[in-house]
Amino acid sequence: MKKRLALVAIAALLISILAACGGTNDKEKTNEGGKPAGGEKVKLSLWHNFTGDDLRAQTMRSIIEQFQKDHPNVTLDIQAIPPDGYKTRLKTVAAAGEMPDVFILSNGSMTQEFSAAGLIQPVNDLIDSHQEWKDGFMPNSFDAFTVDGNIYSAPMGLSPTSILYYNKSILEQNGLTVPKTWDELMNAISVLKGKGITPIALGNKAAWLAQSSIFSSLADRVTGTEWFLKAVKQDGASFTDPEFVQALTYMQDLGKAGAFQDGFNAIDNTQMEQMFAQGKAAMMIDGGWALSNLASNANAEALEQMGATVLPTIPGGKGEPNTLSGVVGVGMGLGKDATGVKKDAAFELIYAMSGPDAQKRTLESNQLVSYKVELDKSKVSPIFSEVYELVNNVKLTPVYDGKLTSAGGEAVNNGLQELLMGGKPEDIAKKIQDAQSKALGQ
């Protein structure tokens, strides 16, 4: 009897040991939610454009570094590409059918085109698995990243693109007030130019800035949003219509009046922002992304002298005057080749870079977000607080390259460079019309 009991005890012990070993094995393979645990090695490629010294870029790089510390099993192959060259490089690899696993994805036409080509994967599962995070976004935040019901990214910021920044001291010292009408703007340009002061800083080296930050809002003032959306679809409106030619003419008038410094096509967006921050220009028309750079590069006295408003009204314009052009910011995209445990790790990286904590840290780095976070004004610059209030009291209108096809957007970018160098508005309008029509197969 004792021998039988001993055998039973030994058998029970062996079973418990085997069960324990089996349990340990399972835990090594997976953690809660079925995601890869620390023991399983994963390699992810990550492309981003957070290369600058602005607070937002520093914050995002810090988040990436923390992710690497928290996930020793995940090896990141990081490509950090300056903003002005990022889209071109990404489109080059996309044309070859190759994609990074996780990368900065622009909403609108880029999301639509990459989706149609099967180059990216939806992130619905990630968003739905974090309901509180999903509910924290402002209304319609996912719209520009949604194609046929699939969501391809979560926005990491909010980008009003046409804020008129101004230096209070320079305007006051020259007997000027903040321009609210087109005539007041042209008068300010004339007065400042006559005194050897650059009226408006412009850095259009990469061509997108004049389109995104000036023309998108200026043209909307002239044509109205409804006309533009019809022209985008080539449905009842054409870019050769008189109102669009008139919008181009207004843009050219700025160049002819000497609104911008010499060589504006030779400096980039960051150099332009530094020029304004250093008091070398009375005004600057730029996006909300400038706030982080200004907070990093301008001293406290300079920041106190900065103000922000919308572009002036246009006489007889069809668009609403109290508006800014703008879109939700970029998000992190998921490449087509990230599958299995690699996809699980990619989801964790995307959440780390755009989840609630990242949204809060982004806001505190002087970058607007489309996420419901209460602003602690003690942690941001005075100009950021002013823009934060401005954005919450105006309506956003479309940014041209967020709605046009890639070919149409490129035609506008190149056309504006040509326009500011003396090109004919009618000729440029036709090039834009031809590019958009051809891209839509019409």
Image (spheres, rainbow, N blue to C red):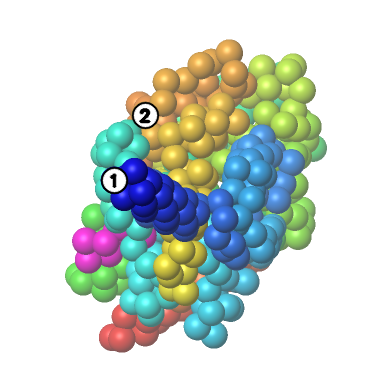
The residue carrying pointer 2 sits among few (fewer than 14), some (14 to 19) or many (20 or more) residues within 10 Å by Cα, namely some
Q: Which mark is residue 318?
A: none
Q: Residue at x 39, y 37 (%)?
A: 370
**Nearer the N terminus, badge 2 or badge 1?**
1
Question: For numbered disc 1, what is the local secondary structure?
Answer: loop
Number of the front mark, 2 or 1: 1
For the C terminus, give its image quadrant: bottom left
Answer whether labels 2 and 1 touch (C-beta < 8 Å).
no
For label 1, the residue is 1
Q: Is residue 14 left or right of residue 415?
A: left
- In the current view of this chain or complex, which residue is farthest to the front? 1
Does 372 appear above or below 254? above
The residue carrying pointer 1 sits among few (fewer than 14), some (14 to 19) or many (20 or more) residues within 10 Å by Cα, namely few
For label 2, the residue is 372
Residue 404 visible at all? no
Instruction: Please give the range of residues in magenta.
Output: 144-152
The three-letter amino acid code for the residue at tag 1 is Met
> In the image, residue 441 lies at what x, y percent?
31, 86
> In the image, residue 140 lies at what x, y percent?
27, 44
149 within the magenta span:
yes
The quadrant in which residue 81 appears is bottom right
Question: For numbered disc 2, what is the local secondary structure?
Answer: loop
157 within the magenta span:
no
> In the image, residue 60 lies at what x, y percent?
61, 42
Does 217 appear above or below 138? below
> In the image, residue 336 lies at what x, y percent?
43, 73
Q: Residue at x 48, y 32 (%)?
A: 357
Residue 261 visible at all? yes
Gap between marks 2 and 1 measured at Cα: 71 Å
The three-letter amino acid code for the residue at tag 2 is Lys
Q: Is residue 383 left or right of residue 81?
A: left
